[in-house]
Amino acid sequence: MTKLSQVSEMELEDGSVPWIGPHGQCMERLELHLTYTCPERCVFCSEEHRMRSYKKFPVTWGRVATILRTHAERGVKAVHLTGGEPTIYPRFIEVLELSKKLGMRTSVGTIGTMLRRKKFAEEALPLLDEALFSIHGPSAEMHDKLTGRPGSFAQVTEALSLCKELKPEFNAFVNTVITKDNIHLLPDTVALVADLGASLIVVSNTTPEGLGEDHYEQLAVPLPVLADVLPTVPERAGDAIVRFFGVPMCLLGKHATLSNDLHWDPRVTVEWQSAPGKVAFTGIYSWAPDRRRVHTNQCTKCDLKQVCSGVFDKYQDLWPTDALVPQGGGPTSTHSGTNS
Ligand code: SF4
């Protein structure tokens, strides 16, 4: 399966980009990094190294407008604004206005910095289809510990609540990253954000990228613990949909179909990349959610191998993976469990 392709904007201009994926998928989702600044210091931040490298290269309005226009022309139908903290981008509202004018669905990944402010939220919400709020614990004690900033939990939960108050039908989604520290609180975190009005809750395994890679040994949740906790989560989510990102499907028990491996859209991520002698605003094409993930010996005979991307490569390098439960009873299976 194709992993990633990286194409500079120069190449984009002549149309020589792979807009059709290896299995016939169309590229309809743009992830656009608007800023490399963030007021928080999450222990697992996948972008920390890049923020350090590229903070001094502001993303200009002209560049943003060009990216939106060229991608709309090529058939992109949805833009997800990310960063850093994208809502602090000085022309954030104009980014939403242009995206809407171009017919795109709009979303933002946020810690709530500006959406907590009523005037800003009132301007943004008519132009915003959804927001993915980062909430990593059921209390300030845990969330603020992981984000490294007192007041962070209050800010993001108030922002989510304000958005639902101003626009009750608003698609308030939540991303919660799991680590050794907060995994035991995950069911409570999920119950809390469902109560706040989240309609989609993404449970994201710590990814070995950025600080997540630097601190992986301290952060990564052992596979047996994932197998114990994750299947208990959906029952705490009320009416919200749960998705599990970066988790082997066989650890989800009867909830394997909630794996994000099955619900993932191809995307082009546009961001600064280092090129010989310069930095370039570059499109990176992802056709499958298999970044940094590998199949293990246990996966060899698993019936789900074609759809499950396995474990993170760094996990396999560091620890045994014999807690995996190959599906379909292949010869490498050590358990009798199934997903049915
Ligand atoms: S055994 Fe491997 S391929 Fe099968 S569900 Fe588990 S991680 Fe995925």
Image (cartoon, rainbow, N blue to C red):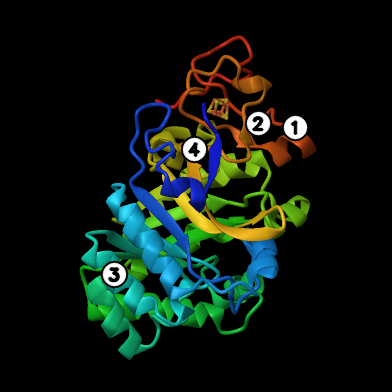
Give the Cα separation between the discs numbered 3 and 4.
Answer: 40 Å
Of marks 3 and 2, which one's residue comes earlier in the chain?
A: 3
Q: Is residue 41 left or right of residue 112?
A: right
Residue 289 image point, x, y percent: 50, 39
CB atoms at circles 2 and 1 under 8 Å apart? yes
Res 321 → quadrant:
top right
Q: Is residue 138 above or below residue 103?
A: below
Of marks 2 and 4, which one's residue comes earlier in the chain?
A: 4
Residue indicated by mark 2: 323
Helix, strand or loop status at disc 2 = loop
Residue 245 image point, x, y percent: 50, 46
Of marks 3 and 4, which one's residue comes earlier in the chain?
A: 3
| Amino acid found under the numbered disc labelled 4 | Leu
CB atoms at circles 3 and 4 under 8 Å apart? no
Q: Count neighbours of disc 3 (C-alpha within 10 A) and say few if under 14, some if 14 to 19, many if 20 or more.
A: some
Res 271 → quadrant:
bottom right
Q: Is residue 272 left or right of residue 340?
A: right
Helix, strand or loop status at disc 4 = loop
- Disc nearest the viewer among 3 and 4: 3
Q: Count neighbours of disc 4 (C-alpha within 10 A) and say few if under 14, some if 14 to 19, many if 20 or more.
A: many
Residue indicated by mark 4: 252
Between residue 228 and residue 272, name the one nearer to us: 272
Give the Cα separation between the discs numbered 4 and 1.
Answer: 18 Å
Residue indicated by mark 1: 320
Helix, strand or loop status at disc 1 = loop
The residue lying at 40 percent from left, 84 percent from top is 116
| Amino acid found under the numbered disc labelled 2 | Ala
Q: Is residue 138 above or below residue 179?
A: below
